[in-house]
Image: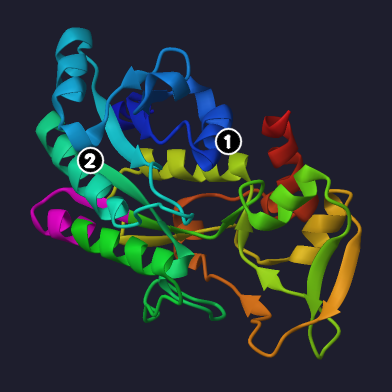
């Protein structure tokens, strides 16, 4: 194992919905966890608000002698009433500057597949045409990363698909609100999407943190094969209430994850809806 693979990862956003699930599955406990607020901090977390500058991180390094192979930014602002999506870029800028000051040479930024807009088999080279403000904000955040990459910091934007358990479908299943309504299209089938289970996501990010070569500037992050939303709902034990799909609905919104699969060895079961649900339930209880 290389020194890079043995060094720890600085994981921010571990108190968020996705971050909590990823942390529970992080391989070997090799993550140093960052929390912005004491009330939401996991035990042993480093309290650091990046928007207040890098001092807390630099002091921690000086006192502990810690070194980090990478900084993983899962912290971010998601859509919701009164939320400032522009803070996604501000957070990225702050963390990139802090990484540079702390001598952390690799930063993984949690972006979103929403930067593309709807489409099928979307590879990293596909044009970006966000269909909503969240996608536009994440694309703006990526621009901040590109500027730092041009200055010599290794920055990789992870365009994440749907994370099982953090998505609207399984959140509704988890609330036990009865049958799940799903669109049915002209071919009799429902929506197809790119998903990833939280354990698989943690393992893939850990692989990228320890990769010996340079990472590409952008990587799609999902299981290699898309899954039907109906299969996920059924795997979670939910009943399905079908409805005719409205004219504006998109049946297939999927990512091409060939580039990621060259870097991370997925297990055959990682794309199985039942396995994705199992990974979600393991951290939901």
Q: Quadrant of residue 137?
A: bottom left
Q: Is label 1 in a helix, a strand or a loop?
A: helix
User: Where does residue 284 sit, x and y in percent of width and height?
Assistant: 70, 33
Task: Write the residue at 49% across / 76% down.
Answer: 122
* Front one among 206 and 140: 140
Query: Badge 2: how crowded within 10 Å, few (<14), some, or many (20+)?
Result: many
**Around disc 1, counting alpha carbons within 10 Å, would you say few (fewer than 14), some (14 to 19), or many (20 or more)?**
many
Q: Is residue 153 magenta?
A: yes
Find residue 1 and report its horizontal and vertical position in percent: 39, 28
Instruction: In the rendered view, tell whether residue 49 sits above or below residue 229.
Output: above
Question: Does the magenta run of residues contain 75?
Answer: no
Range of residues picked out in magenta = 145-156
Residue matched to label 2: 95
Q: CA distance from mark 1 to mark 2?
A: 21 Å
Classify residue 163 as left or right of residue 117. Answer: right
Q: Is residue 139 above or below residue 252?
A: above
Q: Quadrant of the C terminus?
A: top right
First in sequence, mark 1 or 2: give its number: 1
Q: Secondary structure at mark 2?
A: helix
62 horizontally vs 208: left or right: left
Q: Is residue 222 visible?
A: yes
Nearest to the observer: residue 210 or residue 107: 107
* Residue annotated with mark 1: 21
Residue sitting at x 38%, y 41%: 75
Indicate the position of residue 175 as horizontal and vertical percent values: 77, 44
Q: Is residue 209 above or below residue 102?
A: below
> Where residue 239 sits: x, y (%)?
91, 58
């Amino acid at each position: 194992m290389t020194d890079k693979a043995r060094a720890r990862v600085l994981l921010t956003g571990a108190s968020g919905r996705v971050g909590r699930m990823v942390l529970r599955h992080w391989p070997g406990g090799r993550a140093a966890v960052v929390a912005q607020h004491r009330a939401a901090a996991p035990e042993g977390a480093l309290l650091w608000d990046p928007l207040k500058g890098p001092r807390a991180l630099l002091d921690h390094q000086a006192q502990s002698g810690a070194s980090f192979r990478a900084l993983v930014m899962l912290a971010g602002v998601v859509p919701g009433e009164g939320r400032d999506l522009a803070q996604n870029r501000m957070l990225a800028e702050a963390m990139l500057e802090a990484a540079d000051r702390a001598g952390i040479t690799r930063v993984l930024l949690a972006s979103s597949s929403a930067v593309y807009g709807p489409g099928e088999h979307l590879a990293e080279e596909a044009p970006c045409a966000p269909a909503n403000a969240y996608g536009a904000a994440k694309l703006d955040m990526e621009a901040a990363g590109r500027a730092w990459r041009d200055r010599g910091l290794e920055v990789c934007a992870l365009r994440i698909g749907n994370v099982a358990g953090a998505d609207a479908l399984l959140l509704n299943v988890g609330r036990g609100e009865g049958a799940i309504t799903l669109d049915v299209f002209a071919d009799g089938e429902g929506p197809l999407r790119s998903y990833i289970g939280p354990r698989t996501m943690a393992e893939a990010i850990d692989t990228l943190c320890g990769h010996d070569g340079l990472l590409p500037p952008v990587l799609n992050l999902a299981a290699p094969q898309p899954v039907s939303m109906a299969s996920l709902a059924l795997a979670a034990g939910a009943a399905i209430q079908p409805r005719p799909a409205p004219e504006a609905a998109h049946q297939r919104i999927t990512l091409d994850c060939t580039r990621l699969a060259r870097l991370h060895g997925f297990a055959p079961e990682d794309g199985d809806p039942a396995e994705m649900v199992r990974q979600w339930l393991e951290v939901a209880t």
